[in-house]
Image (cartoon, grey):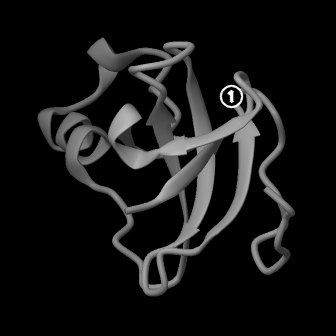
Amino acid sequence: MLRIYCPYCEEYREEDEFSYGGEAHIVRPLEPEALSDKEWGYYLFHRKNIKGSHREMWYHAAGCRKFFNVQRNTVTYKIEAVYKIGESAPEENGEADA
C-alpha cells in the first residue's frame, strides 16, 4: 500500500484515504462544442500509459477533500514528488523530497 503525502494536510496518510483522479495536467478544450466527435473522443479517452515517471491527480477523500498532483513511477510505485494543483510540475527527471 502507498503512503501518500497530502500537500494540504501536510502529512502522510494511507492510500485508502485517497481516490485516483487520472492523468494530471489534462487541459479541457476552450470550445468543446466546436470539436468533432473524433476530437472530443480523443480528449475524453486518450491518455498516456507510460512505463516510468508519470504525473497523476489524486483526491484526499477521507481528509481535506482537495485534489493535488503526484509524480509517481509506474514501475516501482515510488512517489517522486507531490505538489498542489496550480503549482508547476517538477522536472521530469528530478526527484523531490515529498
Look at the image and tell me in which quarter the N terminus lies.
bottom left
Q: Position of residue 65 (x, y in %)?
A: 49, 13
Report the front residue among 3 and 35.
3
- Helix, strand or loop at disc 1? loop
> Farthest left residue?
37
Q: Is residue 96 above or below residue 9?
A: below
User: In the rendered image of this protein, does residue 86 appear above or below residue 66?
Assistant: below
Query: Which quadrant: the C terminus?
Result: bottom right
Q: At 74% across and 33% down in the image, what residue appears?
A: 7
Label count reads 1
- Residue at 79% from the left image edge and 80% from the top image edge: 93
Residue 50 sits in quarter: bottom left
Look at the picture and state if 51 lies above or below 62. below
Q: Which residue is mark 1?
A: 85
For residue 69, what is the image quadrant? top right
Amino acid type at mark 1: Ile
**Horizontal and vertical percent for residue 83?**
75, 41
Name which quarter of the figure residue 97 lies in: bottom right
Q: Position of residue 19 (x, y in %)?
A: 34, 35
Closer to us: 96 or 88: 96
Residue visible at 85% across and 64% down in the picture: 96
Is 28 left, or right, of 87 in this rendering? Answer: left
Tell me: 6 left or right of 86.
left
Is 76 on the left-hand or right-hand side of 42? Answer: right
Residue at coordinates 53% horizontally, 55% vertically from top-left?
3
Badge 1: residue crowd in 10 Å (few <14, some 14–19, many ≥20): some
Observer-nearest of 71 and 47: 71
Above or below: residue 95 compared with residue 96:
below
